[in-house]
Image: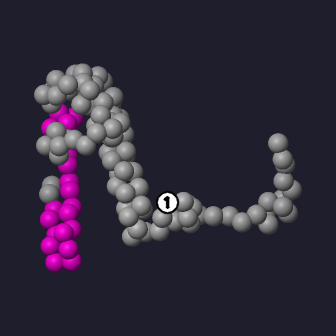
Amino acid sequence: MTILTKQEENKMKKYTLEELTDKYIGEKGTDSREQFEFELKLDVLGDMIKKARKEKHLTQEQLGDLVGVQKAQISKIENNTKDVRLSTIMKVFNALKAKVKMTIDFDTNTHLEIA
């Protein structure tokens, strides 16, 4: 293990998360960055669903029964391992009694808000 002095530590180049993401994933607007951010949003969505399910003391099987899908489908949603239908995700939100608000910008002139 190497221990750095304060002076050596201050000389080290420091990077922001944005700089590291640009360097290793790709800059904003590139296909690789867009794909990364899309997958990250799906991961966050899955984590939110899992947390809400656990807060309601439901198993994946119980939530699946409420939604009308198999336990495996709930697992796939929570772990982002498979594309699922929006209708299934909306049923999951409904079963968890979650309020859903969505904003969709198709272009600079079209804006759709669903609440």
Magenta span: 90-113
Say which residue appears at 24% left-offset and 31% top-offset: 73
Residue 92 sits inside the magenta stretch: yes
The local crowd at label 1, few if under 14, some if 14 to 19, many if 20 or more residues have their Cα within 10 Å, is some
The quarter of the picture where the C terminus appears is bottom left
92, 69: nearer the viewer: 69
Left or right relative to 104: residue 21: right
The quarter of the picture where the N terminus appears is top right
In the rendering, at what x and y percent does residue 107 appear? Answer: 20, 74
87, 84: nearer the viewer: 84
**Rendered position, 41 above or below 34:** above
Q: Please indicate, yes or no, whether residue 86 appears anywhere in the rendered image.
A: yes
In the rendering, at what x and y percent does residue 110 appear? Answer: 15, 73
Residue 109 sits inside the magenta stretch: yes
**Rendered position, 52 above or below 16:** above
Local SS, label 1: loop
Quadrant of residue 95 in the image? top left
Disc 1 target residue: 25
In the rendering, at what x and y percent does residue 84 appear? Answer: 22, 41
**Rendered position, 61 above or below 109:** above
Q: Please indicate, yes or no, whether residue 52 appears anywhere in the rendered image.
A: no
Say which residue appears at 21% left-offset and 61% top-offset: 103
